[in-house]
Image (tube, coloured by chain):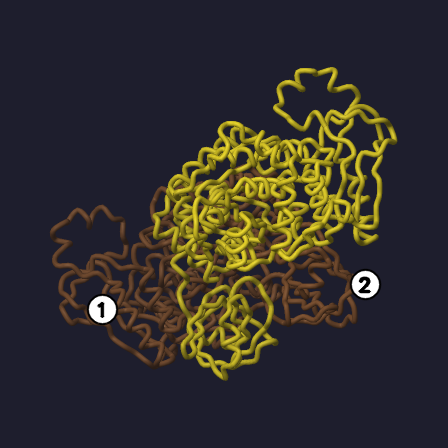
Chain colours: A yellow, B brown
Amino acid sequence: MILKPSIINVDVGENRAILSEKDARDLGVRSLDRVKLIAPELSVTAIVGTSSTMVKEGSVGLMCAHECYAQLSSLQNIEIVPTTRPDSVEIIKKKMDGKVLTSPEVRTIVKDIVSHNLSDVELAAYIVSTQIRGMNLDEVTELTKSMVETGTTIELDKHPIFDFHSIGGVPGNKITMLVVPIVAAAGLQIPKTCSRAISSACGTADIFEVLANVSLSKQQIKDITQSIGGVIAWGGYVNLAPADDLIIRVEYPLSIDPYAQVIASVLAKKKAVGADYFLLDIPTGPHTKVPDFDLARRYAHDFIEVGRRLGIKVECAITYGGQPIGTHIGPALESREALMALEGICQSTSVVEKGCSMAGLLLEMGGVADGNGKDMAREILTSGRALAKLREIIGAQGGNPDVKSGDIMPGKFQATIDSQTEGYVTAINNKDLVKIARAAGAPKDKGAGLILLKKRGHQVKRGEPVFEVYADVEIKLDAARKQAQRLTPITVEGMVLERIPSRRTTIVDYTKTE
Amino acid sequence: MILKPSIINVDVGENRAILSEKDARDLGVRSLDRVKLIAPELSVTAIVGTSSTMVKEGSVGLMCAHECYAQLSSLQNIEIVPTTRPDSVEIIKKKMDGKVLTSPEVRTIVKDIVSHNLSDVELAAYIVSTQIRGMNLDEVTELTKSMVETGTTIELDKHPIFDFHSIGGVPGNKITMLVVPIVAAAGLQIPKTCSRAISSACGTADIFEVLANVSLSKQQIKDITQSIGGVIAWGGYVNLAPADDLIIRVEYPLSIDPYAQVIASVLAKKKAVGADYFLLDIPTGPHTKVPDFDLARRYAHDFIEVGRRLGIKVECAITYGGQPIGTHIGPALESREALMALEGICQSTSVVEKGCSMAGLLLEMGGVADGNGKDMAREILTSGRALAKLREIIGAQGGNPDVKSGDIMPGKFQATIDSQTEGYVTAINNKDLVKIARAAGAPKDKGAGLILLKKRGHQVKRGEPVFEVYADVEIKLDAARKQAQRLTPITVEGMVLERIPSRRTTIVDYTKTE
């Protein structure tokens, strides 16, 4: 059928061809069927939608999820023919039935995802099937490889290359801003790509963007790493493992994160920058992505094994995720606290402790430290070499290299939340803190966030402030304050720590001394 | 945020609010998040989409899946606020984790489906989770009840009410056109609602529409049943169990049909017309929906039990589905063959046999026959009383009550497919026949379809015709012919029946004599 194309510039995440109901009937297709759009030097598939009034007979409305649509819009006519579903649909059904997929099958799915060949329904079926049925390590390895091959790769001139990643879920985890400059200052290459927040208060890309440009090209990432040793870039901008973003888009509304997908997603991005050595931080605790040690150990084992198959030497650190790292949460506030740690004026021992522990492990993996990595990392930090290196990176990424922590201002609207009771802080709910920070405007509003005044083990008097909320916009401060009152993210209980003293010794918790 | 609404009349099956990227950022929402649309006397939710060019800042484009959109379009301004996901999302995740849902949880999901509150992604997650994890009979019962309560119900003045349904998958299954008039002629009430084809060559609604109007109102269904005893109406038109259509819309692109959903879907529509006695035909055989006897027996058991809990006395007949019923496939051709059977001139014993067996079981369930239902049904058929009753029904539904089988013409373009080899028909592939009939234009083109000239056990000479293809449109005939050559749906093998004679006795097959 020959129709006149008109562009409907709406991104619904997939190619859609909107037909009049009559044309759809004449073509013998219905909603969610597929058609092929054929024009000179072009052939793409689209999912059928129908309309009784918007699209006239003889016309087809095309919704964008594909570059070639611009090309289509210049055409007077386009041929539309019904076509079959992509092979992936049968493969997804095989996974639904609990079967193991072959390597070509996994590759077919990834290729179809990246080509926008799967509808939201099919993508959701893939994600839910993977969530329920799981994938074995052969499948995960193939998934990772396919995700690398369908995206951008960055090739540095020299190896070895080091990389680092924290699995999400613990707020205030700004330690990448310590790890990268410490490792780079020790002479190792660390082209760190990171992400923006999806459901957290902020990702490292959101935090570092307060200080410098994180939307760097492939060439910039390469040049800066080769000249300075380190970079902190937003991975989404350079299209590393683009399948991941398309999968996350559908995972997000379901709030699920299939185990196999977590491993493939992280390792694909590390492989894409050519990492030889990779340290994975697995924050573990209630309200994080990895609630218990058994799961953390399983992740560690599987990350190491899949890494081995990809030629990446992976080490994992299971870290304490029971409360935020440091006290500052939110883009501007976290960049400020990270700078304070580098300047040697940070009150939170957890930021410095965790940053130096992680950097130290990388220094040991790189052979520049021999069992004393953490001491060496701390020396690089306290000597000011890490701060100097971060300023070099900030300058190379177009920021102000002379920035000081005191220059970074949180949102101008501020509220203080007081304790309703008296005792000790016995629990902090990470998820509730994130909800409050997001209500205050994070991650979009850079100044939005929280400062914790009390953490676990601290004594609190009735009416004493427990945290502060910051916002760039007054109405969002009100929203955050309401959330704070509703959620009470910080639990204060009378003398609990004294009543159950064993608790202080059974938890391996470097933050409890704060 | 106050925005100016503009209607985008595209049915993507769910409410969508398309925001400019800037407005979405300012609202703090992203693609697939939810917003609430608030106007005087109105509050609906919609799924967020974003556009860089189509929607200007300050405007919101609304895509229709809901009646109230017309109301929205008259407004100058509308308030948009971010809102949380419906409760169903957490309930679906519970099912994803393999847990049993409570009654209120099942009801919440059905309510959200019917209110268009779930996105395609969430609906797909529900369907795939149900497919993999299954549902117990408590869940299925609650699902059925909720589907009834969220749709139209028809209340006849008198009981008992009888009903009949065939599970799909066997082509040529036009026997409803025999069962309804036989049962009604015996004085029982049978308000038969039926469906259009989704993936088959034609549904009963498509077939009977050749002879009469099937888009009947609730009142018409009631009136015709009460005055004549029987009706054959398209269930989709009166909104019986509307959740089902919304679920099918998403099952269709995945070609899955979760076990629990099959039971709930069928029984909800029977409960909605007030059925007291219900006969279920379960065609079983390769390439049908129920490929083996174990599954057929499981279905039978569970249909009976869920029916019991709903107050419906269910009986099931596991029938032979290894090849088509009769020889005619396609809307016009099947209506013709059914009329031929009623006129006593049908060559296919399977149509008459199956029709009388099914009608006979209903007569026995209704107590009008005492163990001799099939004989009584055959008597009603051969006496011409069934034909007279069908003509009454046709007349009441606005068709020509004097219609004869010879009046029904198949498509004017015809091709004959010859055997490439010699021997006996050893197998007929139902799915391949459906593909060919659909390529010829069925179910949209009423004249499109097939006539089988040979069925299982028949002897075939090389070059002898095995089936005919009909189409209303020449180009579709060519497409169907190409499919026929590619698929060879009828397997002819030399002397197989003689070499393995036990085959003729082990299969309980009333069609093998044709």
| B45, above or below A163, in the image | below
Residue B84 visible from this viewpoint:
yes
Secondary structure at numbered mark 2: loop
Left of A250 or right of it: where is B15? right
- Residue furthest right in the image: A463
In-front residue for pair A166/A111: A166
Residue on which disc 1 sits:
B466
Residue on which disc 2 sits:
B40
Seen at 60% across and 56% down, the residue is: B119
Do the residues under discs 2 and 1 have CB atoms within 8 angstroms?
no
x and y percentages locating residue B449 in the rendered image:
35, 71
The kind of residue on which mark 2 rests is Pro
What is the C-alpha distance between the residues marked 2 and 1? Answer: 66 Å
Label 2 or label 1, whichever comes before in sequence order: 2
Chain under disc 1? B
In-front residue for pair B469/A361: A361
Tell me if mark 1 has few (under 14), some (14-19) or many (20+) residues whose alpha carbon lies within 10 angstroms of its own: many
Identify the image quadrant of residue A171: top right
Secondary structure at numbered mark 1: strand
x and y percentages locating residue A81 in the rendered image:
42, 74
| B327, above or below B129, in the image | below
| A374, above or below B223, in the image | above
x and y percentages locating residue B274 in the rendered image:
58, 53
Tell me if mark 2 has few (under 14), some (14-19) or many (20+) residues whose alpha carbon lies within 10 angstroms of its own: few
In-front residue for pair A501/A270: A270
Chain under disc 2? B
Q: Nearer the viewer, mark 2 or mark 1?
A: 2
